[in-house]
Image (spheres, helix red, strand yellow):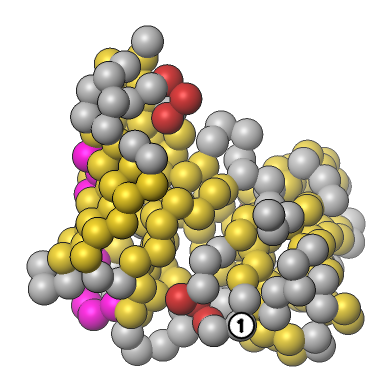
Amino acid sequence: KNEVEQSPQNLTAQEGEFITINCSYSVGISALHWLQQHPGGGIVSLFMLSSGKKKHGRLIATINIQEKHSSLHITASHPRDSAVYICAVRWAAGNKLTFGGGTRVLVKP
Amino acid sequence: DVKVTQSSRYLVKRTGEKVFLECVQDMDHENMFWYRQDPGLGLRLIYFSYDVKMKEKGDIPEGYSVSREKKERFSLILESASTNQTSMYLCASSLRGGYNSPLHFGNGTRLTVT
């Protein structure tokens, strides 16, 4: 069964701390998405990557294809970063996205 | 910026009612999707459409149907709502090119069936 696992499920950090969220998947993929969902419910696409590393502001996403693993890093975290972060993968075979269960991040001031 | 608009943020319906959830996008995207999100289960695909009048079943299509008569609008229909369809429903769109195009989500509709 094709699976996507995220860790940790919940994370609490103090403002300014460096945060890492992990996503592992079971078989080959063609792309991986990182998404952010705020308490109101709307989801924003942060990154889509198939290799290497991408950076946008304080957010950095990396992927290691051989190890079937991706990380999302938040540098100098801020309370407004509090959200659920979701990874989703498109499998190399087939057209569907599979979503991880999400990581709930709380950044305290 | 792409805007995906879902017609309602909150909806309360009775068991057996027919329910329509509407989604409109303004960027001429070919692909549109309906997901439901439940605690502990993540997002699951109900249906998607890659063109007008075209649709494909996702992972959990039972109890749902969809309609795409115009490119910008994708409707999710619950023919006879049941309590196990109480959930958060999210619509998304993307350019043609399959799932390697960025997804743009609406704000979600929280549906309660009593």
Which chain is indicated by disc 1? Answer: B
In the image, taking residue B92 as reference, residue B103 lies left or right, namely left
Q: Establish if B23 lies above or below A77.
A: below
Q: Would you identify the image quadrant in which residue A41 lies?
A: top right
Residue A17: % across, % down: 23, 23
Evaluate whether residue A84 shows in this view.
Answer: yes
Give the vertical position of A106 relative to A85 (above or below): above
- Locate residue B58: give its quadrant: bottom right
Residue at left 23%, top 80%?
A28
Based on the picture, tell me whether residue A55 belongs to the magenta stretch. Answer: no
Q: How would you classify the magenta stretch by its main secondary structure?
A: strand
Q: Residue A67, percent across and down?
A: 10, 68
Q: Position of residue A85 (x, y in %)?
A: 40, 44
Q: Which residue is mark 1?
A: B96
Q: Which residues are magenta?
A: A20-29
The mark tally for this picture is 1
Picture residue at 40% right of the left edge, 64% below the top = A48
Query: Is residue A58 left or right of B107 when viewed as pictured?
Result: left
Report the amino acid beneath label 1.
Arg
Q: Nearer the viewer, residue B17 or B104?
A: B104
Residue at 87% of width from left, 78% of height from top?
A: B70
- Where does the C terminus of chain B fall, quadrant-wise? top right
Whether residue B55 sits left or right of residue A88 in the image: it is right
